[in-house]
Image (tube, rainbow, N blue to C red):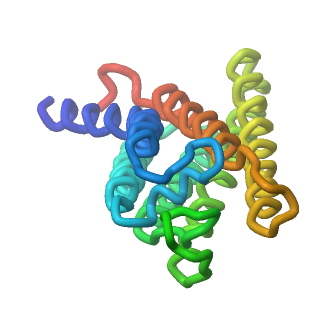
Amino acid sequence: MRANRMLRLVLLCGAVSPVLLIVGLLWDGATRDGYDQVRHGVSQLTSGDGGVVARLLFVSCGALLLAAVLIGSRSPRSALRWQRRLLGLVAVGLVIAGLFPTDPALGYPPGARDAVSVAGALHQAGGTTLFAGVVAAAVVAGRDARRHGRSRWAAACLLTAWAVAVLAVTAGVVFRAVQRGVIGSGPAGLLELASMTCALCWVTAAVLRDRPAPGTP
């Protein structure tokens, strides 16, 4: 019984950790000197002198989410098994994004020149894994929900997949356009934050829906 309570606590912590990550990043961005939440990407919080805070947030969220996915329900439905695998991939992406800081860009950190590094490339790989994993998991969950008559959850999943993909791609386009001088400024950071918020809120909802029923050993 005590072991079951501990497992449920880990599951709950893993489920809510994505939302807490967003809250933590918002607070970190609001208190970081030289950081503009509209212009600068969320990933840029992992760089600079205070980057350790954001990196710890990413790693801890990813680790808790992975634990929650591993101890979640064991539905025999193939779609839900794939959903859990994809959410595990999302968790790994979060950990990678936290372990490796992104490169300086768009004047942040203050005084740092734009640069390209192996660590930055690995961070981008982690971020891509995160967003692609959420989109794929949401599509899988949405199609499964539609087949089983859960129209509201199906709509929420498919809308999430669409919103995350469109916002993330648009953020990347705006970021590159500013970086290359095509436009003077743009809301790349705000778009990325919106995409990440949609993605991680959906992850929380998906993990909570997939949790074992009360009394399940």
| Residue drawn 60% across the image and 52% down it | 40
133 left or right of 161? left
Q: Is residue 7 visible?
A: yes
Quadrant of the rendered image containing residue 143: top right
Task: Identify the residue at horizontal 75%, vertical 51% (top origin).
Answer: 185
Q: Position of residue 189 (x, y in %)?
A: 64, 47
Q: Is residue 32 above or below residue 213?
A: below
Which residue corresponds to the image point at 46% horizontal and 38% vertical from the top-left?
A: 26
Residue 126: horizontal and vertical position, in percent? 56, 64
Which of the two residues, 167 or 180, is positioned nearer the viewer here?
Answer: 180
Task: Reply above or below: 132 against 120.
Answer: above
Image location of residue 210, percent across then percent down? 50, 31
**Visible in this render: residue 73?**
no
Res 30 → quadrant: top left
Q: Quarter of the image for the C terminus: give it.
A: top left
The tally of labels here is 0
